[in-house]
Amino acid sequence: MAQSSCEAEYVAAAATANAIVWWRRLLFGFGEGGTGPTKLYCDNKAATVLARHSGRFDATNHIGLRPHVLRRYQENKVVDVTWLPATDMLADIMTKNTELKQI
């Protein structure tokens, strides 16, 4: 169980990054796929900072080792973890009761 929203978002982003890597490998195996990192949007600033910086954070000692693969993907430019406000997350219409903005 996550002890903070930062941890929950960070672990979810790591799981999503693992799926991204799987799909990229499959597509590259078929000779498809783009170049450069895949954008991974996160609406939690703390989780985004945690993913982007490889330094040691004392406040994250309770997070297991597995989610920290996200940092490695970020450093190797496989994914690009980017902060995006929750109000701009288009996928939220699938999970939350939100009103669509005029585009």
Image (spheres, grey):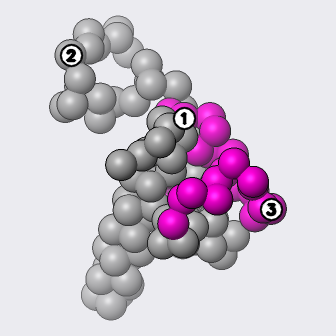
Decide which of 100, 3 is in the foreground and name it: 3
Identified by mark 1, the residue type is Asn
In the drawing, does residue 74 fall left or right of residue 38?
right
Q: SS class of the residue under badge 1?
A: loop
The residue that disc 1 covers is 44
Real-space CA distance between mark 2 and mark 3, rounded to the nearest whole angstrom: 37 Å
**Displayed quadrant of residue 56:** bottom right
The residue that disc 2 covers is 97
The residue that disc 3 covers is 55
Image location (x, y in percent) of residue 87: 43, 19
Q: Which mark is first along the chain, 1 or 3? A: 1
Image location (x, y in percent) of residue 35: 54, 72
Mark 2–mark 1 CB contact (< 8 Å): no
Decide which of 72, 82 is in the foreground and name it: 72
Real-space CA distance between mark 2 and mark 1, rounded to the nearest whole angstrom: 19 Å
Magenta region? 38-64
Name which residue lies at 38% across and 15% down.
103
Q: Which mark is first along the chain, 1 or 2? A: 1
In the drawing, does residue 96 fall left or right of residue 9?
left
Is residue 76 depicted above or below 7 in this figure? below
The reply to whether residue 62 is visible in this rendering is yes
Circle nearer the viewer, 3 or 1: 3
Decide which of 23, 68 is in the foreground and name it: 68
Identified by mark 2, the residue type is Asn
Count of numbered badges drawn on the protein: 3
Name which residue lies at 34% across and 77% down.
22
Task: Give residue 78's mark.
Answer: none
Identified by mark 3, the residue type is Gly
Is residue 1 depicted above or below 69 in this figure? above
Name which residue lies at 21% across and 31% down.
95
